[in-house]
Structures are given as C-alpha cells and as structure tokens.
C-alpha cells in the first residue's frame, strides 16, 4: 500500500493525504499548476515534502535505500528523454539497473517479457531514433516494466500520443493493474480518467478537491468548481466524453 | 567485455613495440646493435610510450564518462575546469621558479587539480544537479585561464615565460620513469572511479529524474565524477601539459562500435585514447621538423579541430 500522509510543500501541495491500493488504476487530475506532477514525484520518492510523509508498505520512503525504492516503484517522467541512440533492447535493459548484480537470467527474462508485453519484438534491435512516437512511448513503458516494480507511476503518459496508441497504452496499464500492480497516472484528459481509472484524485491549487470513483470525483459539479467550466458528460459508461459549453 | 576491447588491445600490442623502435635514432631489432640502444629504449622510449598510454587512457576514459554525465556528445573533460586548474598549478610552479625540483611541477599541477575539484564540489551544491555543476566547472576554467594569463603577463624572467608557454603546449618529450610513477597510479585510480560510476551514467541516459527513480544517488555520482575526472585529467596535465581533443574525439570514434551505453564506452575509450596518443606521439617524434619536434598538444589540436568540424557537419545532417 502506498500512502501519502498530510503532504505539504511550499507553494505546491497543502496538507494532502491519500491512500493508493495495488490492483487499481488511480488517476490524478487537476488544472495546470494544481500540483499533480509534484504529488506524483513525492509518491515516487523523488521529491521530499516539507511536511508529512509517503510510506510504502509502512516504511517511510524518505529513509528507504534508493535502490530498494527503485525496485518497488517504477516511474515514467512526463518528458522522457533518451540521450543516446541505443537500441530498444538496451533501452529496456536500463530498467534492470535497480537489480544490478542479480542473476543475469532473471534480468534477460524480465527484459524479454517487457518487450513482449509492449509488442516490440520486431523493433528489438532498432535504434530509438528510428522509432515512431507511439513505438517510442511503448519502448519507454517497457523500460519501466522491465524493473518489475510493484507500483507504476506515470506522469501524463498519454501526452503526444494519437488515439490508437493512447488506447493501447492505457490498455497495458490496465493489464498491469489486473496483474496486481498499483498504477498511478497523472492524466490531463478527463475523459481518459473517467473511462479507464478505478479511482480519481482531483487536485486544486495543491489541495485535494475530490477523491473517489470517477463518476463522483469527476462529476459535473466538481469539474465546474475546479476547472471553472460548464461541462457535461455525454455517452455511455466506459466511453464517456466531456462536452464543454462556451461561456 | 565489449566488442572493441580485444581489437584495441591488439592495436596497442602492435603499436607499443613499434613506437619503441621509432624516433630520431631508429633501432633495428634484427640488424646490428645501435649504440646505446638499451639506454634509449629503457630510459627514454619506454617511459615515454607508457606515459602516452596512461595519459591517453585517462583522457579517453574521462571523455567517455564526461559525455555520459552531461548527456552531450560535445562534452570534453576540460569542461569541469580541472585541466585548467592543474595547468594553473604547473604555471605557478614555473613562475615561482620551483619547477627546477624534480617533483615540484607535477605536484603543483596536482594541487591545482585538487583545488579545482574541491571548488567544484563546494559550488555544485547539495542536490547534485548537472546544469549548475557544469556552470561551476566553466567558471573555474575561465578563472584558472585568467590567472594563468596573469602569471604569464607578470612573468619574472623571459626564461620563465618561454618555459610556461612551451609547457602549456603539451608534450611527452624528455619525460622519465618518475613521471610514469606519478601518472600511472593516479590514472588507474581515476579510471576506477569512472568505471564505478558507469551504471549510474547508463541510468542518466533517461534524464536526471528517471535516473533518480532508478535508484541513482546524484551526489554519489557527482563525487565519483569529480574524483575520476580529477585524477585522470589532473595526472595527465601534471606530466604532459594540456593535451586537448583526445577526450572529445575518442568517445566519438568508439561509440559506433558499442551499444552506445556510457558504461560500454569507458574502457574502450580509455584503450583507444591510449592508442591514439601512443601513435600520435610516435608520429611527432618521426616527423622531420626544423628546430626540434612537433609538440604533441599542437599535433592533436591540428588533427582534432578539423575532425571536430567534420563531426559537427555530420551531426547537422543528422548522420552522426
């Protein structure tokens, strides 16, 4: 269980508490500057809050050994960069760094499984510079999966992806949750959160504005209060779209 | 072991004996005995060849690690300001006239390198960020450069002036075993630190945040980099003066032969740097030049600068 207890960070988060369950896809939503990425970075142990703490299975993340933390929490940053033109297989193998020194067979097995899970077999030896945007996003996701973390944290993973690739990626996050991992995603697109998350946290200027099943946390009232727009959910369960009325 | 390593080892095994034979006096191992052949080989050429190997290895390995750390193929070990710091130390020893003593110049240079390293660690701050660190290095480099110019302009005697200017050009002429004993252990220790940093440098391929999420401790990495670059580059400058471009070019030549991870690049770059410097120094020795021999530092800059421009043009076309 991943638990944030009354997190405060000057100018960014204010007394924020939340509990995350394994096996669930949790979406973090909110307007620009609401503190979504900050919260995710705190949950990943990459940012120390001024007050409060994040604990993983009861252990304080701030005092946990970085390597042990890295074995448990996989983090996909908002603008993933790949500095060197490595092949997909080498890129994915970077996900094994927290397990360095472990059995080589296990590492190769995890790399192969991650490549297979992201359907990258035919690109295994291709340099990342020659991948399309969607293929690259899958390769970066495979890198996180190769760590075999218990928690998957991703900051706006669907940004810059077209509809098909976004749907495929969100499908693989779902598979990971079904496999028992905890998935926490910062999502800008409220419809994606509504249709694909089990639970949604809505942040507003560093505070928790709503927390619950998507239908409640992203109700039209909440959208109006937090985003200041007059919006209406259209469509059927699981395929809803948000229509925003002009002012 | 990565692919280019055996190839480079073979190259060194061929180049080393050849470099021992080549020079103003050619030694023919099969022909009649040259006068003083043993003295020339053991007291002059062997230490010089070994120095070329150690200095080249240090610069090549440091360049590979530096490019990995800054995630930039145009990074050079000189960027941290350690080479200028070491050079400043050496210049001061000549300025003060201490360079007459056998160990004074290298010692001053090492103190200069250590000073630059300490200053770098002090300025770089607690969070281990790369950008601030690089700026600190640039600042140290330009400060050292300014102080060096000051020392040169206030040079007490014309002799000291010419000594300083000649030394700054970088060379392995007239070096002895003493210099090998200084450079070898420090370079090996420095390379050890850089190899220890290799896995963290791999993680940095994904950017600083992702590297931290993979368990990299940025402060530990920074410490390893300061120690590794400081020892390799500091030792190199202490015995050979400023030799540029090796740390910049060698990783470029080696990278396409590897899987392009920084960790796969450090050892092959060290070997390639050793080979390059050994061959270049031998070539300098053989080239007929009125009034002495071509300075190694000048020769490498003459080869390096056009190569670098070629590289930039290729990068511009997206082929690199």
Image (tube, coloured by chain):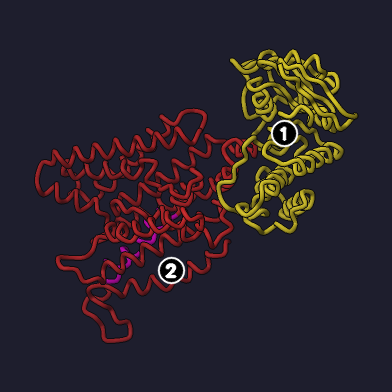
Chain colours: A yellow, B red
Mark 2, residue position: B12
Q: Are marks 2 and 1 in contact (CB under 8 Å)?
A: no
Give the magenta-colored segment's residue range: B40-60
Q: Quadrant of the C terminus of chain A?
A: top right
Residue A129 in percent (x, y) is at 60, 52
Q: Give the residue at the far left of this rendering.
A: B157
Q: Nearer the viewer, residue A115 or A134?
A: A134
Location of residue B112 in the rendering, given as x and y in whole percent from the top left corner: 31, 40
Task: Please indicate, yes or no, whether residue B58 appears anywhere in the rendered image.
Answer: no
Residue B224 vs residue B72, the one in the foreground = B72
B246 with respect to A146 (left or right)? left
Q: Estimate the x, y position of residue A67 in percent, counting from the top left.
A: 66, 38
Q: Chain of mark 1?
A: A
Q: Using a 10 Å C-alpha cutoff, classify the residue at mark 1 as few (fewer than 14 neighbours), some (14 to 19) or many (20 or more).
A: many
Residue in the picture at 72% in, 19% down: A246
- Looking at the image, residue B314 sits to the left or right of residue B113; the answer is right
The residue lying at 90 percent from left, 29 percent from top is A237
* Side (left or right) of A105 relative to A24: left
How far apart in space, not on screen, are marks 2 and 1 (Cα)? 48 Å
On whether residue B56 falls in the magenta region, the answer is yes
* Quadrant of the rendered image containing residue B55: bottom left
Give the secondary structure at mark 2.
Answer: helix
Query: In the depicted view, which residue is nearer to us: A245 or A37?
Result: A245
């Amino acid at each position: 269980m991943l638990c944030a207890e009354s997190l405060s960070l000057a100018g960014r988060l204010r007394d924020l508490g939340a509990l995350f369950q394994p096996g669930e896809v949790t979406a973090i939503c909110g307007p620009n500057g609401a503190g979504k990425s900050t919260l995710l970075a705190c949950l990943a142990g990459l940012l120390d809050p001024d007050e409060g703490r994040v604990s993983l299975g009861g252990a304080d993340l701030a005092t946990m050994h970085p390597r042990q933390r890295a074995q448990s929490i996989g983090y996909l940053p908002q603008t993933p960069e790949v500095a060197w033109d490595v092949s997909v297989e080498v890129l994915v193998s970077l996900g094994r760094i927290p397990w360095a020194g472990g059995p080589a067979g296990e590492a190769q097995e995890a790399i192969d499984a991650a490549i297979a899970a992201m359907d990258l077999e035919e690109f295994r030896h291709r340099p990342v510079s020659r991948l399309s945007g969607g293929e690259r996003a899958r390769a970066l996701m495979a890198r996180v999966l190769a760590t075999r973390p218990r928690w998957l944290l991703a900051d706006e993973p669907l940004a810059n992806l077209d509809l098909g690739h976004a749907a495929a990626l969100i499908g693989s996050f779902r598979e990971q949750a079904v496999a028992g991992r905890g998935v926490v995603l910062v999502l800008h697109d409220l419809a994606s959160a509504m249709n694909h998350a089990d639970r949604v946290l809505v942040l507003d200027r560093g505070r928790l504005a709503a927390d619950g099943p998507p239908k409640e946390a992203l109700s039209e009232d909440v959208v109006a209060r937090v985003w200041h727009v007059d919006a209406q959910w259209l469509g059927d369960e699981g395929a809803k779209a948000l229509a925003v009325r002009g002012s | 072991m990565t692919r280019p390593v055996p190839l480079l080892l073979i190259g060194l095994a061929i180049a080393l004996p050849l470099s021992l034979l080549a020079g103003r006096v050619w030694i023919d191992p099969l022909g009649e005995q040259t006068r003083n052949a043993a003295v020339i080989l053991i007291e002059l050429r062997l230490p010089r060849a070994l120095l070329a190997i150690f200095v080249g290895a240090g610069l090549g390995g440091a360049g590979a690690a530096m490019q990995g750390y800054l995630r930039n193929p145009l990074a050079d070990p000189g960027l941290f300001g350690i080479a200028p710091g070491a050079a400043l130390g050496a210049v001061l020893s000549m300025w003060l006239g201490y360079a007459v003593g056998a160990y004074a110049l290298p010692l001053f240079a090492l103190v200069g390198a250590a000073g630059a390293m300490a200053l770098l660690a002090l300025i770089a701050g607690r969070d281990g960020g790369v950008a601030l660190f690089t700026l600190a290095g640039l600042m140290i480099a330009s400060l050292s450069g300014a102080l060096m110019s000051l020392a040169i302009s206030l040079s007490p005697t014309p002799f000291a002036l010419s000594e300083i200017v000649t030394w700054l050009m970088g060379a392995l002429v007239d070096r002895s075993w003493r210099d090998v004993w200084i450079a070898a252990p420090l370079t090996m220790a420095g390379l050890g630190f850089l190899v220890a940093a290799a896995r963290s440098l791999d993680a940095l391929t994904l950017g600083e945040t992702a590297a931290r999420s993979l368990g990299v401790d940025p402060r530990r990495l920074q410490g390893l980099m300061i120690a590794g670059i400081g020892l390799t580059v500091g030792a190199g400058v202490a015995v050979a003066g400023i030799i540029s471009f090796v740390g910049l070019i060698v990783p470029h030549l080696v990278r396409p032969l590897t899987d392009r991870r920084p960790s796969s690049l450090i050892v092959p770059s060290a070997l390639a740097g050793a080979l390059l410097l050994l061959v270049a120094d031998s070539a300098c020795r053989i080239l007929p030049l009125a009034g002495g021999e071509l300075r190694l530092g000048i020769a490498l800059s003459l080869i390096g600068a056009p190569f670098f421009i070629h590289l930039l043009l290729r990068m511009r076309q997206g082929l690199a």
